[in-house]
Image (spheres, rainbow, N blue to C red):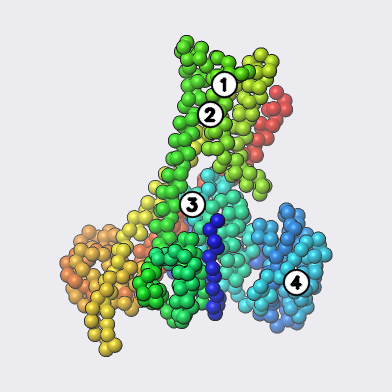
């Protein structure tokens, strides 16, 4: 079992809000959809406060919302939504409580209250009087600002197979305290969540998705002062201690978590006090070159996850096909071949040889290869929802159980009812084939983003200055470590590492990837250049002005991702049909069984 990452916290501050560009991108795509009336508004609408019963009432002789405090309470003993309702009712009945939100999945209650009228002990007492155990969580019951800042984060969600899964994930997320809105895209396996980081963390969002029966991983957020670094050279706890000592001595670092299992470190830092490149350089110099750090690219990780999922699904498909083909031949083809038919009709105890072979092969397909369907169906039913996995489990289990019962009945009575082992095996094989095609299709939908990401060069040539501002050398660095104000050298035939301004040299640059204009554009001192474009002739020195999510290319990628999350009206209707399809099928099946 991998050990959890060790976390070290220093001075903390509220994370920054969404950038204006992020709002502009969402509004641009959403506005285009409204103008054509054929795409839904992708902006994350609605607020958590409205869902929880509105904002705190003003007036009443109070000095304003700034005086409110917030407490996070761990509540144990809740088993269903009725329990959460009981807790909310018990706490809300206390005078001075403004808002209450209870999460069944997290076993947590978030209470906003007036500390002049009610105390934390009173809240704990109210929950215990309702029949549940409660304890205050650390770092809670602190005054809350008048307006909460929100972040927008992307998560990769695995295990979704249909629109029902999308609806389930969105429903689970929107019920979490602190989440303002959530949009999930099945084609790209991505989810975008707008949340209040002072109420819920990204780890808790990941936990909520995993509790719903899906896989989840955090990709990136609009919080610009958090970074995930990959490490090489970290093998033991002693190495982790050395890295901890190095990071602890750095100014500007507020929090970091070292994960020795994955060889990663997550760092929250003040970009005004320390730069990302300085962090990487300090790690390498402080360890005398033993540790090497590099920025983890979320898109590369996503591509690796897609490839791993496709490989895993192909392995399951081949295994199921390898076992199902003999079952199909024994049932359909072999009875027409006299020699093989005679061999299969031989008795092995009370069973025919062919039936016994079928039973063994299908049992492996049903319960070993098909185990994933049982797990997914159980998780869906546990949370009161249904999906296509429920239908697969019902259909194949009915066929398998009936065939086993018929086989045993024939063995003890001599009467041989028909058996349908091949139905169970072939259904699972065909469903796995469909899921494999679905994984491949998901990979193709993200090809556009992958190609955009590949436009950015992997490295950049940084010009080094001495104390007097004179250039004394150059150094090749990771392009993700470029900082605003850096002077970069762009050679003929290479790509521009980031958006910037030419400070020396003349050349022509191919900007067709942005403008579509095939003719090279002349560049001289003070000319603006765009990251990802190709320098054709002379050497240029450019000063970086925008890096990371602020570049033109990053904004294009963000718009493409936002557009992929939008849904046409027909797709929303299809989601609605999918949400009621499984219950209707099961109801019709029960009705047919009852009146046959």
Look at the numbered discs 3 and 2 and tell me whether their residues touch, using CB distance below 8 Å.
no
Residue 411 as seen in the image, left or right of residue 186: right
Q: Compared with residue 191, is residue 393 higher up or lower down, i.e. above or below?
A: above
Q: Position of residue 30 (x, y in %)?
A: 48, 59
**Sequence-wise, which precedes: disc 3 or disc 2?**
3
Residue 390 has which mark?
none
Q: Earlier in the sequence, mark 2 or mark 1?
A: 1
Q: For residue 320, say whether it is visible.
A: yes
Secondary structure, mark 4, is strand
Quick one: 545 or 58, which is closer to the camera? 545
Tell me which residue sits at (52%, 16%) in the image: 344
Secondary structure of the residue carrying tag 2 is helix
In this rendering, is residue 10 above or below 302?
A: below
> Mark 4 packing: few (<14 Cα in 10 Å), some, or many (20+)?
many
**Above/below status of 386 relative to 92:** above
Q: Residue at x 61, y 54 (%)?
A: 211
Viewer-nearest of discs 1 and 3: 1
Residue position marked by numbered label 2 in the rendering: 361
- Mark 1 Cα-neighbour bin, 10 Å: few <14, some 14–19, many ≥20: many
> In which image quadrant can residue 24 be found?
bottom left
The picture quadrant where one finds residue 576 is top right
x, y (%) of residue 488? 27, 74
109 vs 448, left or right, is: right
Task: Report how far apart the C-alphas of labels 3 and 2 lie in the structure.
Answer: 33 Å
Task: Determine whether label 4 and label 2 are within 8 Å by CB.
Answer: no
Find disc 4 in the rendering and name its residue. Answer: 97
Q: Are marks 4 and 3 in contact (CB under 8 Å)?
A: no
Spatial CA span between label 1 and label 3: 42 Å
First-in-chain label (4 vs 2)? 4
The residue furthest top is 338
Secondary structure found at label 3: loop
């Amino acid at each position: 079992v991998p050990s959890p990452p060790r976390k070290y916290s220093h001075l903390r501050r509220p994370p920054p809000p969404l950038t204006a560009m992020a709002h502009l991108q969402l509004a641009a795509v959403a506005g285009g959809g409204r103008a054509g009336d054929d795409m839904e508004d992708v902006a994350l609408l609605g607020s958590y406060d409205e869902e929880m019963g509105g904002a705190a009432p003003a007036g009443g002789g109070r000095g304003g919302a700034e005086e409110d405090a917030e407490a996070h309470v761990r509540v144990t003993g809740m088993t269903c939504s009725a329990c959460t309702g009981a807790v909310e009712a018990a706490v809300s009945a206390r005078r001075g409580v403004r808002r209450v939100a209870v999460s069944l999945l997290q076993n947590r209650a978030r209470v906003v209250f007036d500390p002049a009228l009610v105390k934390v002990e009173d809240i704990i007492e109210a929950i215990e009087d309702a029949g549940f155990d409660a304890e205050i969580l650390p770092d809670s019951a602190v005054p809350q600002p008048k307006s909460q800042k929100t972040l927008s984060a992307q998560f990769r969600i695995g295990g979704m197979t249909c629109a029902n899964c999308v609806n389930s994930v969105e429903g689970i997320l929107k019920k979490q305290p602190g989440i303002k809105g959530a949009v999930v895209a099945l084609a790209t396996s991505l989810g975008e969540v707008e949340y209040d980081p002072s109420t819920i963390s990204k780890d808790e969002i990941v936990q909520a998705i995993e509790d719903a029966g899906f896989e989840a991983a955090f990709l990136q957020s609009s919080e610009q002062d958090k970074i995930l670094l990959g490490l090489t050279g970290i093998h033991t706890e002693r190495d982790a201690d050395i890295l901890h000592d190095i990071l602890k001595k750095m100014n500007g670092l507020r929090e970091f978590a070292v994960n020795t299992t994955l060889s990663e470190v997550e760092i929250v830092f003040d970009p005004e006090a320390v730069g990302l490149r300085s962090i990487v350089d300090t790690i390498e110099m402080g360890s005398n070159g033993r540790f090497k750090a590099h920025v983890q690219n979320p898109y590369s990780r996503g591509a690796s996850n897609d490839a791993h999922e496709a490989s895993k699904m192909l392995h399951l498909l081949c295994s199921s096909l390898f076992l199902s083909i003999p079952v199909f031949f024994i049932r359909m083809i072999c009875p027409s071949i006299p020699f093989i038919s005679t061999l299969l009709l031989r008795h092995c105890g009370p069973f025919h040889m062919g039936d016994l072979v079928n039973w063994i092969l299908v049992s492996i397909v049903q319960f070993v290869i098909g185990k994933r369907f049982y797990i997914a169906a159980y998780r869906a039913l546990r949370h009161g929802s249904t999906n296509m996995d429920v239908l697969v489990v019902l259909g194949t289990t009915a066929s398998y159980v009936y065939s086993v019962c018929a086989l045993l009945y024939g063995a003890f009575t001599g009467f041989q009812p028909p058996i349908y082992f091949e139905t169970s095996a072939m259904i699972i094989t065909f469903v796995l084939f469909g899921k494999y095609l679905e994984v491949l299709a998901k990979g193709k939908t993200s090809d556009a983003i992958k190609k955009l990401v590949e436009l950015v060069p992997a490295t950049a040539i940084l010009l080094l200055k001495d104390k007097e501002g004179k250039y004394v050398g150059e150094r090749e660095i990771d392009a993700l470590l470029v900082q605003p104000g850096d002077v970069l050298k762009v050679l003929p035939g290479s790509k521009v590492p980031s958006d910037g301004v030419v400070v020396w040299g003349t050349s022509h640059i191919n900007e067709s990837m942005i403008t579509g204009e095939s003719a090279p554009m002349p560049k001289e001192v003070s000319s603006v250049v765009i990251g990802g474009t190709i320098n054709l002739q002379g050497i240029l020195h450019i000063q970086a002005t925008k890096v990371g999510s602020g570049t033109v290319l990053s904004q294009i990628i963000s718009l493409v991702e936002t557009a992929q999350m939008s849904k046409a009206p027909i797709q929303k209707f299809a989601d609605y049909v999918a949400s009621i399809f499984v219950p209707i099928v099961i109801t019709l099946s029960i009705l047919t069984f009852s009146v046959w």
